[in-house]
Image (cartoon, rainbow, N blue to C red):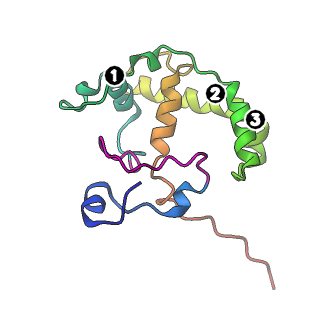
Amino acid sequence: MVRPIWMETERYGEYSKAGEFVYDHPFLWGSRRIGPDLHRVGGKYPHLWHVQHMEDPRSTTPRSLMPAYPWTLEAELDFEAIRGAIAAMAKLGVPYGSDEIENPVALARLQAKQIGLEIEAQQGPAGLESKQIVALIAYLQRLGKDIQTPPEASPKSSP
């Protein structure tokens, strides 16, 4: 959460709005600061940067205190678990469309394939589309994007 104080908004960007967290279950707010704020990291770096950062944080950020997460590049992603997670979130009120509810595994595999291809195009390792790193990258690349996306206009009825 980016708090509405000058030092934080100067460093991390626009302060957090309540609507950005409305569908988070559970809410992940905390008061302890140990590292940079990730809430605005979406789109800030290319996918390959995240791969390198998770494998060896000091390769991208020399004085980083973050531990390495190299197993995310090797551990298989359980795509079938997505079905249950989407169903639970929909019951909690997350407004997924019918396609997301009916085809979450196919959509996740498609997104993972796209991320994997982009990593390869950026001269990164091949074959990551079935690994946990792609889910982590998809999540990180989304953080902070909701404040940048204007709401869709509702269709106007004709007189």
SS assignment at label 1:
loop
Query: What residue type is disc 1 on?
Result: Ala
| Mark 3, other Cα within 10 Å: few <14 / some 14–19 / many ≥20 | few
> Could you give the CA–CA distance between mark 1 and mark 3, rounded to whole angstroms?
33 Å
Query: What residue type is disc 3 on?
Result: Asn
Q: Does residue 60 appear to the left or right of 2 in the view shown?
A: left
Q: Does residue 57 appear to the left or right of 71 in the view shown?
A: left
Mark 1 or 3: in front is: 1
Query: What residue type is disc 2 on?
Result: Arg
Decide: is 84 above or below 157: above
Instruction: Evaluate if marks 1 and 2 touch, with contact meaning CB atoms under 8 Å apart.
Output: no
Decide: is 7 above or below 134: below
Residue ID at (30%, 62%): 9
Which label belongs to residue 103? 3
Q: Does residue 45 appear to the left or right of 6 in the view shown?
A: right
Residue situated in front as seen by the camera: 22 or 104: 22
